[in-house]
Amino acid sequence: MRKPRYLADIHISPLTCYLLHKAGYQVTRVADILPLTVPDWKVIEYARNHEMIIITQDLDFSALLATTNATKPSIVSLRLSQTEPQAIAKLLIRILPTVEVDLIKGAIVSVTEDKIRVRPLPVH
């Protein structure tokens, strides 16, 4: 099975992406491939077309998937009060292996400091 590829939204720090990459994750930042003003639906379209999982702190992505009854792309939605790039990377490195199968199938994974919630796609 091929390792998942991740697309980090604009609000995800380059340092977080670097640390994930260093830990073996295939991560690309939206800012490196799309214009900074790109609308969220275009990011979703790009991720879907390139079989990538979106990592974001923007709650709009989950809402867009829910309202369109989409089955892809999967989303890791970070709802954290902690904003330090190293702490976010450490958390992702710890939790991504535990939800990888769900993300490959199609899911929205909401992450807080004390909880991980997995909702299979499409969201009903």
Image (tube, rainbow, N blue to C red):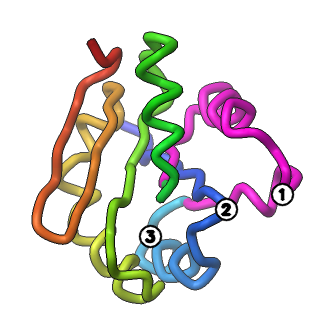
x, y percentage for residue 93? 31, 71
Identity, as a three-letter code, of the amino acid under mark 1: Leu
Quarter placement of the N terminus:
top left
Q: Which label's residue is closer to the chain start, 3 or 2?
A: 2
Identity, as a three-letter code, of the amino acid under mark 3: Gly
Within-10-Å neighbours for mark 2: few <14, some 14–19, many 20+: some
Number of callouts: 3
Provide the residue span drawn in magenta: 27-55
Circles 3 and 1, Cβ within 8 Å, touching? The answer is: no
Tell me the residue at 17%/45% (across/down). Answer: 117
Seen from the viewer's position, the closer of residues 4 and 114 is 114
Identity, as a three-letter code, of the amino acid under mark 2: Ile
Tell me the residue at 59%/51% (across/down). Answer: 7
SS of the residue under disc 1 = loop
Q: Which residue is mark 2?
A: 10
SS of the residue under disc 3 = loop
Residue closest to the far left? 114
Q: Which mark is residue 36?
A: 1
Tell me the residue at 46%/73% (across/down). Answer: 20
Q: Disc 3 and disc 2: Cα gap in Å?
A: 21 Å
Seen from the viewer's position, the closer of residues 123 and 14 is 123
Q: Which residue is mark 3?
A: 24
Seen from the viewer's position, the closer of residues 17 and 24 is 17
